[in-house]
Amino acid sequence: MENVLQIVAGTLSGVGQFSVVNVFSKMELIKGIRPLCAGDNLSVTTVMRKANNTSTGKRQAKLSTIERNGQPIGTFEIDLLFRGYNIEPSKAFKREYGKKTSIILTSDIDIVVLEAKEWFIYREDAAIQLQPNTPIEFCLDSEYRYKSDTIYSSIVTTGTVTVKARGGRRVHIADVDFQHTAAKHNPVVDYLSRHAVDIETFMFEDGGYSLVDSANAHMAQAIVPDSNWDYACLAMDGNPVHTNPYIGDFVGNSGTVTHGLWTSASTRSIVERIVACGHPERIRAHSAEFIDMVFPTDRLSTELDHVGMKSGCMLVKSRTLNIDGTPVLNCVTEVEQPLTVYVFTGQGSQKVGMGMVLYQQSPAARAVWDRANNHMLATYNINLLDIVRANPVEHTINFRGRAGERILRNYMACGKPSLVPGLTAESSSFTFQAASGLLNATQFTQVALVTAALAAVADMQMRGLVQTHAVIAGHSLGELCALAALTDVFTLNDMLDIVFYRGLIMQSAVQRDKHNTIDYGMVAVDPSRVPAFDKRQLHLVVDAIGGEGLIQVVNYNVRNNQYVVAGSLANLAVLQLVLDNMASNGCSGEFSIEQMVKQVQVTSETPVRGMATIPLTGINVPFHSRLLLEGVAIFRDVLQAKVGMVEPDTLEQRYIPNLTGMPFKVSQEYFKLVYDATKSSAIKEALNNWNDTLLDIPAERSRLATILLIELLSYQLASPVQWIKTQDYLFNIAGVQRMVEIGPSPVLCGMAAKTLEAVSSSKKAELLHIERDHDAIYYVQPESKLLNNLNAAAIVTATQGSKSQLETSVKPTFNPANSEPLQPPLQQQVVSETKAPIVDQPIPVIDVILAIVAFKMKKPLGD
């Protein structure tokens, strides 16, 4: 009888079909790709990755690439073991496709060693040579053939070596070409393994924390269905060890075995509910290691631990156990954080000592501060750390000696004429002064805030906390912080120069009296404090004041709740008195507004708080007003000297400029939007020569993206900040669920809270500030929650014993559109899947013969 079954098994199912075991599987979506949706048109291409012998049998791995509308979106990998079967070593092979490895060489000697490798070949057109501490990425294909089970008969490894250039572009600088025979190891792979750095993954030092607690313990359990047919039909996996109890008994499984991929999908569904909060689209990768068999009606429980971060995704390890505590499955899942925007605070949020706690605690943050301080000392003789820590009221720079002469040339290169009033080519020294401290002097404030922001982001990136393709925005100076921190458009040193010059341009654009004082200021206006008053009425009041001197709405922060007006102190005093009058007595019609403005008598220009106005203390430069238009051309020159060719993909649909409040895009429509706001001659020229067909050429798109970025940042200097439009896009169009503010104070979180309060309750987002909400951003668990999680295991065990609490089995949901469900053959529908002993009945010889003939002729048994 056993001989007959072996004949049937070998003939119908192929050698080893009944002994095949799922060892490993992994699904991974490409970074930044839209998740799968119902109705997507998919195609799959599969290649064999390996077929080789191990001590327990033949290993066979396949890699499938999933495409949507012709574009790759992800991969699926499966690794199988055929127990007790082997192949001829000469037929064995192993392939690795597109394996990426990053290394960082810290010295010139290490670089020389790499360059001396015969398999490392510089490209003739390579424009960049390797430098110490620069991440180098290898992307390699390798193919191995076997001479025996442990020795390769041939190794071929080829691929590319790239580094990132300014603008975010990856530059192909070298190739790898290695071929060898009769070897046990691949020297290329061995070298990279010794130097590899995982700059994307951060594992929690304490091993992480449990995600299962008393509130969700019931969600971490599942009952395996009593039949495998539903999954077998939908997955088109007809291996009879899953569906035929006779075969299961024959191979020693005491019945049918549940599909390993069902168990993996069941565990994944638990991760989706508990970790991804019911949003399966947040699962970016899911791998499973199969430990033991699972049978129908088994009760399973899953332990979930958040063990680290990877490129902004939560790394979740899960361990699924049977009711007797036997581990059956280990999984690692990458769960995307909710759609996040990183926003950066602008000037006015600075404070003495900002960032210094992180400086002491974080090597990554300290490295940013030290690099910035070294650059400012070497270039401008400015001790940035001293300014942040002590906020001195003055600082004198000497220009004697060669070093002093070089520093003087750097200052004189800031603009023509010099942007530093009183400084000439013959100056032997210069003293910066500020009554409230140099940290509050615009040129130093901006450098300090940018450095603090970059240091904070560097620490987050070191810990894998930053979502790779998150939306980025910043208020005023914060826009530059966002670009410097979360794109590759600027280097640290270039951004420090840019914001230092930006501050000097702003300071020099405003006339000073003989006492070196400035007759300008800024006030925050809350229209809601004036009855029947909104943005339109505010503009009417501003226009009515107009006349001589400056007055302009320069920040649109919260609709009908918060605006900022810049102007001369006299005009701001008029604004305060008019709004006080309107708040007390009301206003009807435009004529009343004009009359009120004419009747106001200003007795003092000293800024005071009004019923609807709050002076912004310490700010005497009218930021973002038309008074700074003269500085646009100078700032453009600065940017053009610092910005290389911009890679559009690093900015499009991610970066939201202040000037438009809409995401950056290289399109004719967006260029028109920018031209309408600026009347930029560079934008006009690009529009006059616009040709959509040229957008298919990467170099042309890059050229246009560079022009667009420079004009957006140049005119941002003298244009209102459109933060209301920015928030409208974030919360109403992009659907952002989480805002992380980076800056000394939670200014933008406050604006967002007011914005969300004013809209329907359905619009919600988690508003986090880098310091106030540190534990939430860094996933630091409070002791009370940790204690609760420790008790969860006991709760799970108790719940396992009560079948009433497991009302339904947890199984993957399949709903193929417009297709009838597959039905099992009639003969197998009536077979009861049970673990009870099966009586051994002889199979008629005619049935065996018919089965073999039907299989060979590819005909149904009934024909």
Image (cartoon, rainbow, N blue to C red):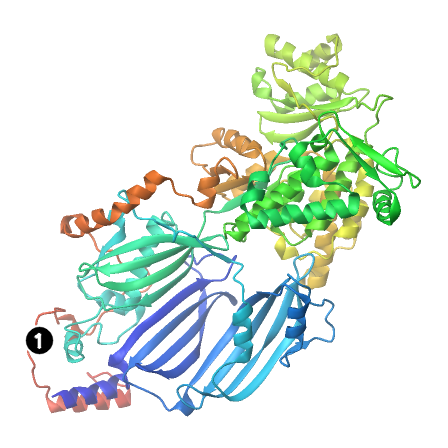
> Residue 651: horizontal and vertical position, in percent?
63, 52
Q: Quadrant of the C terminus?
A: bottom left
Callout 1: 10 Å neighbours few (<14), some, many (20+)?
few
Q: Quadrant of residue 7?
A: bottom left
> Residue 763: horizontal and vertical position, in percent?
46, 36
Residues 44 and 445: in front is 445
What residue do we see at 70% from left, 13% from top? 591
Q: Is residue 17 left or right of residue 835?
A: right
Q: Is residue 156 left or right of residue 568?
A: left
Residues 407 and 463: in front is 407
Q: What residue is disc 1 on?
A: 838
Helix, strand, or loop for circle 1? loop
Q: Amino acid at mark 1?
A: Ile
Q: Is residue 533 left or right of residue 273?
A: right
Residues 476 and 386: in front is 386
> Residue 19: horizontal and vertical position, in percent?
25, 80
Is 345 above or below relative to 571? below
Is 724 above or below relative to 77? above
Is 148 above or below relative to 736? below
Q: Quadrant of the N terminus?
A: bottom left
What residue do we see at 15% from left, 90% from top? 3
